[in-house]
Amino acid sequence: MRRRRFPWFSYLVVILGGVAMVMPFLDMLMSSFKGAGEYGVIPYQFLPKSFGLDNYKAAFDQLELGRLFRNSVIVTVSVTVSVLVTSSMAGYALAKLRFRGRAVIFRFILATMMLPPFLLLIPTFLIMLNWPLAGGNDILGRGGDGGLTTSLIALILPFTVSGFGIFLMRQFMVSLPDEMLEAAKIDGANQWQTWRLIVLPQTKPVAITLGLITFIGQWNEYIWTLLISSSDPSLQTLPVGIQLLQSFLDPDRTMPIVMAGLVLSTLPVLVVFLLFQKYYVRGVVLSGLK
Amino acid sequence: MTTAVQVRTAPVTVAKRPALHREGRAAYLFLAPSLLFFCVFLILPFIFAVVLAFSDWGGFDLGTIKFAGIKNFSDVLSFDGTFVKPILVNTLLFAFGSVVMATVGSVLVAYCIDRLSFQGFWRVLYFLPVVATVVAIGNVWKMMYQPAGLINGILNKLGVNSIGFLSDASYALPSVTVVHAWASIGGAVLILTAGLKAIPGMYYEAAEVDGANSWHMFWQITLPLLRPSLLFVLITQFIAGLQSFALIIVMTGDGGPVNATNVAAFEMYQQAFKFGAWGTASAMAMVLFVVIFVITLLQLWIARRRGEETS
């Protein structure tokens, strides 16, 4: 809005709100430096006595951050790559190819976004547990101990396709000019080559958007990972591991060590987000304008 | 003439058909991974969820599953149990409270950001909680709520006694609701600022010529024209609020003190994975799904009726 006067009221609101937004993160950062006897004392002190890195070292040793980090990276990268590939394939078919059932399938993809995840939580867990011919199960999915729930695959498989991703890709690809695809066809390219060599390079901006949303969402995924890793702690990712390993920490400074672990586990997503925030913001806005 | 046209069109359609046929086959190959996924991880679990809700089953052997009719639902919805009151009531209070706080907050903030410079910076600032994991958010706020934490520290400075935000049963639910609202403002601000950008500036200029102040402009121009984005924010936030429980696991562990922060999706989780009561848990999931569905329809219906009145 174009106003001539200095918008002091707006500055006041936005800055006060901004302090409320940032304060918890500052408190997290400051607490991550507090030593034994400094945390949990009344009266509350915002600043730590020193900015030593003891808690960060303890987080690496006692929280096993290295192992958690490895799991987080494997799961997040696999899911992101898979969502990008499957979404761009399905999006291309729905946007540019003519075939019987296209309208029905597109409506079905939209409907998949309406089903809340909690509804599918129990049956999905039972399906993974009774997966045929996995983890010692017989062909009917019986007899084994754990089925597919005993490896990192359990954390990846249920997230490999995204209805939202297909929708986003389809909406973007619809606006690609048909002439370009016709030209590729005349030059003798088959559908696979057209998708791979002509369409994919054009979808870079929306691919970055979808990749970011998927990456950040999966890095922070909590409920499913908590469930799967409850029987096998070696499957924990950063958020779940940090939450569950609290009881094994030095009790004098449990919270400060947890805070150090959280600072370290938040940094990668924060950096990725700040680098590409323009794309992320556009994705959220796009999803809001459907 | 007509015969000539027929003669000419006939070969074209014949030539076109195999091409279309090939295109159809290619399309289904491109769609195959996604459709296969949805069969295994969406349609199958959905059917399974419905079956479970009407069954009596514990353990893991599918051979022992028994049809139970509506017994699970009558158990769950019985007023003697804990599911309707306090759990479902908590869920509605949690969702409604956080939606109201987040919506009022985000409308105000988005409206103010829209009049400032460095809008990108402000939006990113409000968006930070959306990027952080629920474990970070939950633990930091848990820490800030403690007697020796930041918030009680400020209260003590102001001469107010410490409050047991999470330990006092009457404060616990509002305390987690505030955190959920705080964490969801950022997403709403993004969508609302995009909505504000779409309002033509000439409306404001015309209103200014007519002598309207910013208060009038906000109520008479901004809010009515923001309605589509606002409706989207309300509906998605309500859906998210009604099913969210990760924050509650992190902040209160078991939905305590004494069920004060227990919500429907969390109770479902506990019934299923702590007690192995698949049937009861699935019935709870169905009830919550219906509640979400009805509330969403209700919002759309109200929005449409109000739309007819004003236009």
Image (tube, coloured by chain):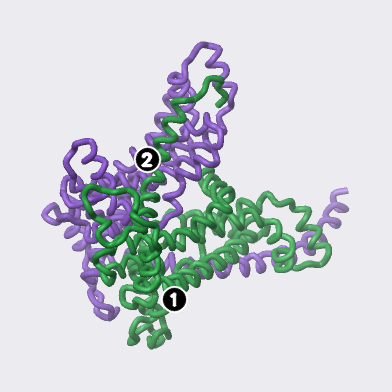
- Does residue B93 appear in the picture of this structure? no
**Relative to A182, does residue B218 appear above or below in the rendering?**
above
Relative to the observer, which residue lies in front, B170 or A111? Answer: B170
**Relative to B201, does residue A138 appear above or below in the rendering?**
below
Task: Work out how far the residue at label 1 is from the one at label 2, CA to CA, in angstroms.
Answer: 36 Å
Determine which quarter of the picture holds residue A60.
Answer: bottom left
The secondary element bearing badge 1 is classed as loop
Instruction: Report whether A30 appears left or right of A91.
Output: left
What numbered label is drawn on residue B102?
Answer: 2
Residue under the point 32% across and 43% down: B98
- Does residue B207 appear in the picture of this structure? yes
* Residue under pointer 1: A152
Colour for chain B in the figure: purple
Tell me the chain of label 2. Answer: B
Determine which quarter of the picture holds residue A91.
Answer: bottom right
Q: Residue furthest left?
A: B80
Q: Amino acid at mark 2?
A: Ala
Residue A169 horizontal/vertical position (percent): 60, 56
**Relative to A82, does residue A168 appear above or below in the rendering?**
above
Q: Residues within 10 Å of mark 2 (few under 14, many from 20)?
A: many
Residue A257 horizontal/vertical position (percent): 34, 64
What numbered label is drawn on residue B254?
Answer: none
Q: Amino acid at mark 1?
A: Leu
